[in-house]
Image (cartoon, rainbow, N blue to C red):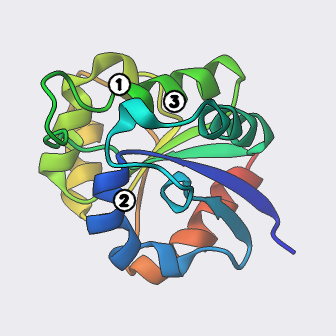
Amino acid sequence: MSKYSLYLAGSIKIWKEQFVPKYSKHFNNTIALNEPGTLDVPADHTQISPFVTKRCVDEIKAADAVLSYMKPYATVGKEGVPGVDSSWECGFACGLNKPVIALIDDLEHFLYFEDQWMLSHNKSAFISLDPKVREYALESSHYTDPVVITLTDVAEIETVIAQYLDAP
């Protein structure tokens, strides 16, 4: 049985292309990871049923924390700003006083969050394999006492998140 439950906030397109091959296999031992991309979500997001939306809201409510894996991307055949749904999910989790942990691939990815000031200032922690992320965050005047955890191996991600959530 899993010790914690996490909800993954992020683009379904990015989830399929980047998160699944790199990170998904490292979860579901001590942390149950709810990956909304596994739901029946059509490519045309205007066709997503209210059931899917309600299910995501219920999953965020039930989760111990939200894992945010957000990056800029081109929406499928649409104009506009991508990531609004994921930002809403993170904000909703913050409103419920749940930790929001950002998973960061590298410094360029981290700088995307820095441009998203409401997101960057409301993350409980940042986790990355790139030690440059920690160095930059600790030296940046943008953050006050940031929690930045550097992994030495992607396989330790689940253990490190559980340890973070265990801490008082």
Residue pointed to by mark 3: 90
Disc 2 secondary structure class: helix
The extreme right residue here reads 1
Say which of marks 1 and 3 sits in front: 1
Q: Position of residue 118 (x, y in %)?
A: 37, 17
Crowd tier of the residue under label 1, counting other residues whose Cα lies within 10 Å: few below 14, some 14–19, many 20 or above: few
Quadrant in which the N terminus appears: bottom right
Say which of marks 2 and 3 sits in front: 2
Say which amino acid is labelled 2: Trp
Cα–Cα gap, marks 2 and 1: 15 Å
Sequence-earlier tag: 2 or 1: 2
Sequence-earlier tag: 1 or 3: 1
Residue drawn at (26%, 23%) of the image: 116
Say which amino acid is labelled 1: Val
Quadrant in which the C terminus appears: top right
Q: Position of residue 111 (x, y in %)?
A: 16, 38
Residue pointed to by mark 1: 84
In the displayed structure image, the side of residue 19 where residue 5 appears, left or right: right
Residue pointed to by mark 2: 15
Where is residue 121, by image quadrant? top left
Sequence-earlier tag: 2 or 3: 2
Disc 3 secondary structure class: helix
Nearer to the camera, 28 or 77: 77
Nearer to the camera, 27 or 51: 51
